[in-house]
Amino acid sequence: MSAYPDDDDGDELRRIAELGSDMGKPMPVDFTVVFPDRKSADSFAGLVKTLGYAPLVEPEDDGFCCTCTRELIATHAAIVDAQDKLAAAAEAFEGILDGWGSFGNAPPR
């Protein structure tokens, strides 16, 4: 039996673990939130910075993307909690959470 639930978040966590990351140690995790305009993305970036994230706003095809990076121990519960909080905060700025990812913390090969 897997240590992670059988869902998209669990699949990503398994992939990170299989690449050699120590899942009991913090690693940078990037959460992606998309916005219709730069002003909304920048306003959201200011908010998430106060919540401990390092935001990066960049243009994309249909608007702007705010990548919110934070060091955390990547448990399923921590990932789901962060996504829920970011999605709720993004709503006020017309933003939509578009997933997450991490290169983990495995030593370079």
Image (cartoon, grey):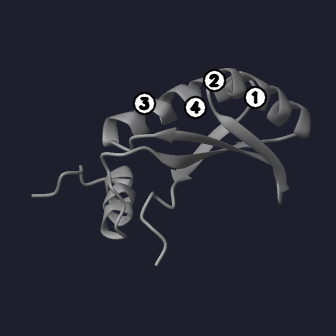
Can you identify the residue that label 3 sits on? 81
Please tell me which of labels 3 and 4 falls first in the chain: 3
Q: Which amino acid does label 2 sit on?
A: Ala
At x 71%, y 21%, the residue is 92
Between discs 4 and 1, the one toward the N terminus: 1
Q: Which residue is drawn at 71% across and 35% down?
A: 95
Q: Using a 10 Å C-alpha cutoff, classify the residue at mark 3 as few (fewer than 14 neighbours), some (14 to 19) or many (20 or more).
A: few
In contact (CB < 8 Å): disc 2 and disc 4? yes
Residue 43 x %, y %: 82, 26
State the residue at coordinates (36%, 46%).
Answer: 25
Question: Where 53 sits versus 31, above or below?
Answer: above
How many residues crowd mark 2 within 10 Å: few (<14), some (14–19), many (20+)?
Answer: some
The foreground one among 106 and 5 is 106
How far is mark 2 from mark 3, CA to CA? Answer: 12 Å
Residues tagged 1 and 2 counted as in contact (Cβ below 8 A) = yes
Disc 3 from disc 4: Cα separation:
10 Å
Residue identified by numbered label 1:
44
State how far apart marks 4 and 1 are (Cα). Answer: 11 Å
Q: What residue type is labelled 1?
A: Phe
Q: Which amino acid does label 4 sit on?
A: Ala
- Relative to 5, is 43 on the left or the right? right
**What residue type is disc 3 on?**
Asp
